[in-house]
Image (cartoon, rainbow, N blue to C red):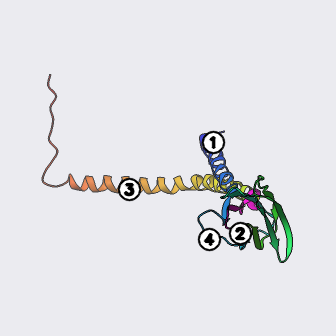
Amino acid sequence: MNKNQIYWVVAILVINGGWASIAGNTVSQEINRPGADFSYEREADIGTLFSEDKIPISIECSFTSINGENHEVGWELVKEGKLIASWNGNSSENCIGWAGEVNGGSYVVRTLSNESLETTITLNIQPFEPLRYHVHIAMTFLMIIFGFLEDLVRKFWPKTKKKELEKTIVEEINVSSVRNEGVWQDPIRQKKS
């Protein structure tokens, strides 16, 4: 393997490593949180670019009683009236979230809570995950094509550059010889014995 090929392999690894770190990122949408206006229902649009594959999502939740009393709490994830996931319990229990894959579309997250509770419901979406392997393959393929194209360009590029360089050198020699034909001559140097 020559030096240029090693650079291309490193470039492929760097590009794919960068995409791997981006594809795994999560986008969080706060459904309810302490200090914000509480809503029993919030819409959430779940989708990805250029893909109809299922999208990984997760729901994180917590209910904390302000006055120390226990209250019935829960959450539901609904699409077009159909229940996708839910949890019901008591504010003294740990809220159990959910993780799964869903089709893109408009969803509704319902929250069962009241004013004497601090409620946190967060919907986490991984919009690039369905595209992960497609983009890895496409980026690797494109980098290989650019590598071969670069080799082809290098094979033909130096020939044209060399011809231009030779022409420039010949022109400079011709111009410098014309300059020396004037009244002034180069000094004659004598060798000292």
Q: Nearer the viewer, mark 3 or mark 2?
A: 2
Q: Nearer the viewer, residue 10 or 73?
A: 73
- Residue 125 on the magenta segment: yes
Q: Which residues are magenta?
A: 114-133
> Of the residues under marks 3 and 4, which one precedes in the sequence?
4
Q: Amino acid at mark 2?
A: Leu
Q: Which mark is residue 49?
A: 2
| Occupied quadrant, residue 134 | bottom right
| Occupied quadrant, residue 146 | bottom right
> Of the residues under marks 2 and 1, which one precedes in the sequence?
1
Q: Which mark is residue 168?
A: 3
- What residue appears at the point 60 percent right and 67 percent down from the top-left corner? 36
Q: Amino acid at mark 3?
A: Thr
Disc 1 crowd, CA 10 A, few/some/many (<14, 14-19, 20+): few
> Of the residues under marks 4 and 2, which one precedes in the sequence?
4
Disc 2 crowd, CA 10 A, few/some/many (<14, 14-19, 20+): few
> Of the residues under marks 1 and 3, which one precedes in the sequence?
1
Q: Quadrant of the C terminus?
A: top left
Percent x, y for residue 92?
76, 53
* Residue corresponding to mark 1: 6
The answer for how far apart the CA atoms under marks 3 and 2 are is 53 Å
Which secondary structure, mark 3? helix
- What residue appears at the point 62 percent right and 55 percent down from the top-left corner? 152
Q: Amino acid at mark 1?
A: Ile
Dots 1 and 3: beta carbons under 8 Å? no
Q: Nearer the viewer, residue 109 or 104?
A: 109
The answer for how far apart the CA atoms under marks 2 and 1 are is 33 Å
Percent x, y for residue 34?
62, 62
The answer for how far apart the CA atoms under marks 4 and 2 are is 31 Å
Which secondary structure, mark 4? loop
Dots 3 and 2: beta carbons under 8 Å? no
Q: Nearer the viewer, mark 2 or mark 1?
A: 2
